Image: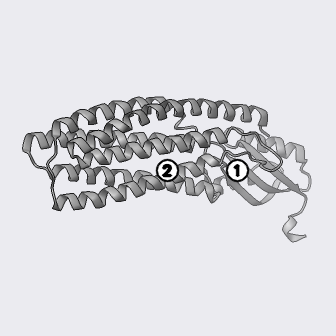
Amino acid sequence: MSDHAHDDHHHDHAAGANARALTLALMLTFGFLVVEITGAWAFSSLALLSDAAHMATDSAALAIALLASRIALRAVSDQRSYGDRRVEVLAAAFNSLVLLMVAGGILVAAVYRLFAPAEVLSLGMFSIAVAGLVVNLIGMRILSAGRDQSLNMKGAYLELWADAVGSVGVILGAGAIWLTGWPWVDPLVAVAIAVWVVPRSWGLLRAAGRILMQSVPQGFDLAEVRGQILTTSGVAGVHDLHVWTLAGDDAHLTAHIVLQPDATPSRVRAALARVFASKIDHVTLQFEQTDCRLA
């Protein structure tokens, strides 16, 4: 009921474009990471170090996302009938977990620094944070085209987005320290960055978890799908109805369709094809004259 060859070509093309975008973003991010870590040490800034930690996780996340994107290009085989596209979902889940752990580590370090403030060189901190923001915005631009096509790309984009917000926080913190001389602003900014990152990382982890648990994809109401099937001409009943997604950008449906006595399977199939045409990528139906559960 769908053009599998066309779908496979579309997925392969998108995965190839995503891999190229991830490669560029990784080169850019990793190149700046060394600069930011050096600056955090030289200017004694925990906020800058927290931003560098995000940059480090960005680099790791982009590398993992790139590897997953490459693996996802592997062809379907008799051993892997769905291919390896779900590796991208695993990568997104892993990256969200890393972000959560980094945020926790920064919170602990920030609380310690609040009770033992250290002198911060605000102007150096400011200049590196501005450069970091520019790097993140360029990386986000590179990844923006693929973030709605793949949960893996969305995770990589979220990493850079979180880091960009972190850079803005560091810039504001550096300005505040320069104007007031209050060193406690630095760990306070680090806490704010960590707290901002947590709910977004958790949301990505939940989305990946829904896919891995084969839950009904977001945007689908199973009761509504069931109702559409039951109101199709020639359908007497439906059971064993399942809707799931393989990697977040596709939808699969399987169902047992009980036919009315005078119904023709080919006509019912064509009618259901029209129902699912814009919503479901892959449909597998089993037609029954009587409910197989009663046999």
The kind of secondary structure element at disc 1 is helix
Residue type at mark 1?
Gln
Q: Which mark is residue 19?
A: none
The answer to whether one can see residue 169 in this image is no
What residue do we see at 73% from left, 50% from top? 253
- Is label 2 in contact with label 1 (beta carbons under 8 Å)? no
Q: Which residue is mark 2?
A: 95
Position of the N terminus by quadrant: top right
Position of the C terminus by quadrant: bottom right
What residue do we see at 20% from left, 58% from top? 113
What residue do we see at 53% from left, 32% from top? 23
Horizontal relation, residue 146 to residue 178: left or right? right
Q: Nearer the viewer, residue 40 or 262?
A: 40
Q: Which residue is mark 1?
A: 228
The kind of secondary structure element at disc 2 is helix
Horizontal relation, residue 275 to residue 267: left or right? left
The percent coordinates of residue 47 (x first, y second) are 25, 47
Residue type at mark 2?
Asn
**Mark-to-mark CA distance, 2 and 1:** 38 Å
Q: Nearer the viewer, residue 111 or 255?
A: 111
